[in-house]
Every structure is written in C-alpha cells, then in structure tokens.
Image: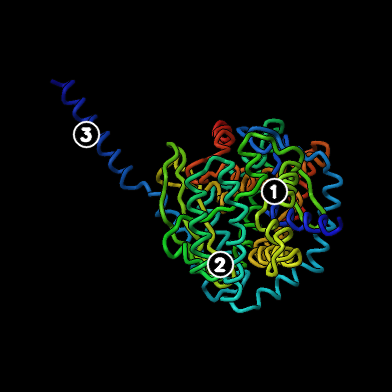
C-alpha cells in the first residue's frame, strides 16, 4: 500500500515538474523573433551610436552562446592549450565578439527580419529560418539561426547562416589562418584579438 | 587573341564573384569530396592586395555611381542580366541531370524574353516559377565529383579554384550560347563588344548589391583575405551541392566536438 502511494506520489511529482519545464521552455522561433525585435528596437531608437552599441552588446550577451562559439572557432587548437590560455582566450574572444557583432549591426538602420519557420535538427539544435526584408538598396537576404536548445528554458544562438554561409565557420577559418601564418603560435591570435578590441 | 583573352578574363570574373574557406587543414569540408588547398597563398595574398587596390580605385566608385541610378533601372538591368545568364545555366542543368529544372529554366527564359521584354521584367517569378539558381561549368564539374584543386586569386577577377577557372574557360570555348551568338553568330544585333559590356555590367551590378556587406566584412575582419577565401569556398560548396542550408546542415561534427568540452 505504502509502495503504491509512494510511486503515485513520485509519478505526480515527475508530471508536475515536467509540465513546469514545458511551460517555461521557449520555442526557438519565438526566441529568435523576440531577439530580433529587441535588436530592432535598439537600432530604431534615437540613441547615440555608442548607446546603441551598448544595448546591442547587452542583447548579445543574453542571447548568444559566446563561450560555445569561442570554443568552436578555435577548432583543433583548443585541444592544445592549457587552462590559463583557455581562460585568456575566452575573455579575449568575448570582447572581440561583442565589439565586432555590435559594430556590424549598428551600421544597419531599421532592419526588418521576418521569422518564417523552424526545423529541429536534434535535441541540442533547432534551425530557425528567416529573411531580412529587401530594400531599394539591397536584395532580400536569407538568414538561418542555429539555436542551441540543450536547455530549452534558455535557448542560445550559436550561428548565423547568411545565404548558406556560416558566420562562425568563416570566423574559425580566419582564426586558423592567423595561427597558421604564425607557425601555429596561438599567442599570435591573442595579440591580434587584443589589437582589434583596443 | 587579345580579345579572346580579355573576354575569357571577364567571363571568369562573373563565374567567380566574391563570395571564400579554409580551416586548420585548409579543407573545404570534412564531408566534401576533396580538400581545397591554398597552394599559392603568398602569390594569392599579393594578388588579393592588388585587387583590393583596384576595387577601391575603380570598381567601388563605379558601383556607388551605379547605385544612384533609379531603382527600376537597376532592377530591370539586373533582371535582364539574370535572364541572359540562364543561357549558361540551362546546358549545365542538363549536364548535371537536372532535366526538370532545365525545363523550368527554358520556360522562364522564353516567358521573360518575350512577355518580359528581353528579360527586363521578371514575369516568370510573378507567375510563381520556382526560385532561379545560376549554374556554371565549375559547378557541373563539382557535381560530377571533380575536385576543386587549389584555391587561386585571379587578378581583377578575384577568388576561384583551378576547377572553377577551367570551367569558366569552357564558356568561351563554345559552352556559353550567349557568347556563341554574340561572337560567332554573324548577326547585326550582337557582337563581342556587347558581350563584354554585358559581363562588365554584371560585375558592377554584383558589386553594387554588396557594397555594405563587403565593407562591413572588411572592417570587422582581422584577416580579410582568409574571410573572403572561407566565404567563397563555402558558397561554391553550397552551390555545387545545390543544398538548402537549413535542411542540409554540414559541419555538424564540429559542433558535436564542442559539446564534449
């Protein structure tokens, strides 16, 4: 009897918590649209350029998996560095990423992005498809968002694929080129990153 | 001979465009048929610098001027150029075994050339024809499994590979119907000068459409050469696979490795 009650109670607990988890999980397409709306609001506001950049950095810090991208962009080199170098790299990469990201976006005024669909790749990733609506000056651009959904309550962006071209892949190959041009010395990448974020 | 060389070079420019790769091993993809090595990196970097200088001095200012033209003129020009490009796309659709797409593109070309007044109006798209994708001989060779060979940067014409460069030469060796009609067609409407003008305008149109994106990439790159190489090779890979990036996710393995960190 006691065993039956306990198991019923446990089942109830499991159902209760799983339903809470379901309620709190954020659909990746809604997450992308909301992130885009936040960025759009920051860009359309009559803030100074510095204030816009600050706002965009804040949005990126909350919605992008900067450390995950940092590890990815280091490629095979991440296996050959020690813990201190790893810490230094992630710190430099975060500063680099936020500066580069905000500066890229701050150039755009009133970017209109429409989220079209989503496709679950596996438990960890969902691709969200969207378009950057064309203007008189430039054609429509397809943008796919690789959203990391391992924790469905806190989805995070891991890549933007613009017209089929992966931004993090490009970044990884740029970093690799810098390291290779300096005989495989990772410190050369650190110096270049420091120079960029100055 | 000189004319043929110039024409070949201009054809190449349009077959290549800006969009370039290399990871630690300079390979296009772990899943791709062959590695793309930057065998001539020193020379390529020098040529890339030369091209950047030419771009700043000539191509960019011309593209800026082109952008000042009224929008209907630019879109009409762009439509007409795209319509002409389908003459090269159709034989490549057939060579890649894409007979249905070849049929659609023949229909598109017929409608746009007639109802669309020499392609100025994209009537076919308004009639809900599927999205048009350009094809060239480099892509066909890729689809046949021929490796890209080394990555090369051509003077004026920009990023390419040995395979894509060879593919572009096929255009002027009888592979491009528009070239054949213009240069060997023996008619009063088309000639080699018009063919070359068309190709130059295509280059300007491409540059004008990408003014901000290229500026932005350059400004935010620590190694602009490597970024362009990465984008060009990714773009070619995607075009050869005719893949939908959302459905056909490559590089998945790289992310799996990050999970184990």
Q: Which quadrant holds the C terminus of chain A?
A: bottom right
Q: Measure the C-alpha gap from mark 2 to mark 1.
A: 30 Å
Q: Earlier in the sequence, mark 2 or mark 1?
A: 1
> Mark number for residue B20?
1
Q: Reply above or below: A40 against A68.
A: below
Q: Label 3: chain? A: A
Label 2 in the same subunit as label 1 = yes
Residue B55 occupies which quadrant of the picture?
A: bottom right
Position in image of residue B62 (x %, y %): 74, 72
Q: Label 2: chain? A: B
Residue A188 occupies which quadrant of the picture?
A: top right
Marks 2/3 in contact by CB < 8 Å: the verdict is no
Q: Measure the C-alpha gap from mark 1 to mark 3.
A: 55 Å
The answer to which of A99 and A183 lies nearer the viewer is A183
Name the residue rendered at 25%, 39% in the picture: A16
The answer to which of B126 and A131 lies nearer the viewer is B126
Q: Reply above or below: B73 against B51.
A: below
The answer to which of A162 and B198 lies nearer the viewer is B198
Label 1 Cα neighbours within 10 Å, binned few <14 / some 14-19 / many ≥20 = many
Position in image of residue B167 (x %, y %): 71, 45
Label 2 in the same subunit as label 3 = no
> Mark number for residue B162?
none
Q: Measure the C-alpha gap from mark 2 to mark 3.
A: 67 Å
Position in image of residue B27 (x %, y %): 70, 36
Marks 2/1 in contact by CB < 8 Å: the verdict is no
**Where does label 3 land, which residue?**
A12
Colour setup of the view: rainbow
Q: Is residue A31 left or right of residue A79?
A: left
Name the residue rendered at 79%, 39% in the picture: A180
Q: Is residue B215 visible?
A: no
What kind of element bears circle 1? loop
Q: Is residue B145 left or right of residue A186?
A: left
């Amino acid at each position: 009897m006691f065993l039956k009650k306990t198991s019923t109670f446990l089942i109830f607990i499991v159902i209760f918590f799983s339903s809470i988890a379901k309620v709190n999980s954020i659909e990746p397409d809604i997450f992308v649209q909301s992130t885009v709306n936040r960025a759009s609001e920051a860009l359309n506001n009559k803030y100074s350029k510095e204030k816009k950049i600050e706002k965009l950095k804040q949005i990126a810090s909350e919605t992008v998996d900067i450390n995950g991208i940092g590890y990815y962009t280091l490629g095979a080199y991440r296996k050959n560095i020690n813990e201190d170098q790893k810490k230094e790299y992630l710190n430099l990469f975060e500063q680099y990423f936020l500066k580069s990201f905000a500066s890229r976006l701050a150039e755009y005024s009133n970017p209109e992005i429409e989220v079209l669909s989503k496709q679950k790749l596996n438990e960890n990733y969902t691709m969200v498809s969207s378009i950057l609506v064309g203007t008189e000056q430039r054609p429509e651009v397809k943008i796919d968002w690789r959203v990391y959904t391992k924790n469905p309550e806190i989805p995070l962006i891991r890549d933007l694929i613009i017209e089929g071209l992966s931004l993090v892949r490009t970044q990884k190959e740029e970093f690799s080129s810098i390291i290779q041009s300096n005989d495989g010395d990772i410190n050369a990448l650190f110096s270049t990153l420091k120079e960029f974020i100055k | 001979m000189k004319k043929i060389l110039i024409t070949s070079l201009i054809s190449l420019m349009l077959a290549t465009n800006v969009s370039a790769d290399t990871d630690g091993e300079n390979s296009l993809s772990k899943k791709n048929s062959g590695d793309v090595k930057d065998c001539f990196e020193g020379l390529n970097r020098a040529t890339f610098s030369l091209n950047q200088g030419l771009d700043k001095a000539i191509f960019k200012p011309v593209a800026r001027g082109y952008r000042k033209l009224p929008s209907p003129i630019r879109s009409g020009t762009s439509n007409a150029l795209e319509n002409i490009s389908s003459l090269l796309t159709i034989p490549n659709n057939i060579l890649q075994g894409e007979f249905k797409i070849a049929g659609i593109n023949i229909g598109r070309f017929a409608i746009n050339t007639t109802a669309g007044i020499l392609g100025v109006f994209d009537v076919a798209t308004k009639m809900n024809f599927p999205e048009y994708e350009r094809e060239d001989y480099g892509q066909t060779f890729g689809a046949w499994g021929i490796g890209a060979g080394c990555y090369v940067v051509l003077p004026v014409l920009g990023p390419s590979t040995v395979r894509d460069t060879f593919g572009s030469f096929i255009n002027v060796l009888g592979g491009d119907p528009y070239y054949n009609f213009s240069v060997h067609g023996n008619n009063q409407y088309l000639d080699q000068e018009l063919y070359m003008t068309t190709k130059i305008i295509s280059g300007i149109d491409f540059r004008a459409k990408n003014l901000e994106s290229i500026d932005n990439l350059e400004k935010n790159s620590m190694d602009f050469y490597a970024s362009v190489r990465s984008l060009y090779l990714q773009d070619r890979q995607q075009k050869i696979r005719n893949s939908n990036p959302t459905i056909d996710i490559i590089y998945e393995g790289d992310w799996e490795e990050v999970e184990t960190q």
